[in-house]
Image (cartoon, helix red, strand yellow):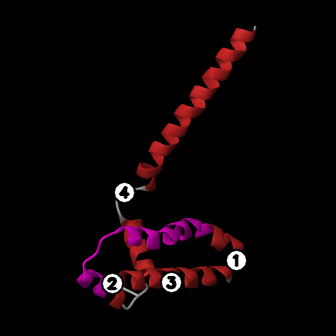
Amino acid sequence: MNKKEQLIERLKNEFRDYKEALITLPAIQVFNKSYETAIKQEIPYIIGDMEFSNFELEALNKYKGNLLSAFYDEWIDYDLGINEVLEPSVEKATRFIIRDYKNEQNKSSMEL
């Protein structure tokens, strides 16, 4: 297994441990952590798509703390909010919905 595969495997194991800890929490706490869960679940896949030098991979693999939490904590503090990522998708879906609604309205008025 190469260094990048080791890193991804480590992140997946940390996510598995995170999920096991969630199971022990009351439902409301699990619900409140759903955003964190969704982001942490994606991190190994993002890492898989990124390029790293051997030195960077070695440093990441030797990190003593919880690497998944370190990535999440940095992400949550980043200035780019989810709205900046989500808003274009909402706008696009809105355009499709409005287009379909207009088509329905036009069809209904033609039937009269």
Which labelled disc corresponds to residue 80?
4
Residue at the image position 67 percent from the left and 22 percent from the top? 104
Please, is residue 52 above or below residue 55 in the view? Answer: above
Q: Give the residue at the far right of this rendering.
A: 112
Circle 1 Cα neighbour tier, 10 Å, few/some/many (<14 / 14–19 / ≥20): few
SS at mark 3?
helix
Along the horizontal axis of the image, is 50 left or right of 14?
left
Residue at the image position 35 percent from the left and 63 percent from the top? 78
Tell me which segment is drawn in magenta. Answer: 32-59
Looking at the figure, which quarter contains the N terminus? bottom left
Residue 103: percent from left, percent from top? 63, 21
Eye-nearest disc, 3 or 1: 3
Amino acid marked by disc 3? Glu
Give the mark nearest the N terminus, 3 or 1.
3
Give the mark nearest the N terminus, 2 or 3.
3
Question: Label 2, on which residue?
Answer: 60
Circle 2 Cα neighbour tier, 10 Å, few/some/many (<14 / 14–19 / ≥20): some
Q: Nearer the viewer, residue 10 or 82?
A: 10
Q: CA distance from mark 1 to mark 2?
A: 33 Å
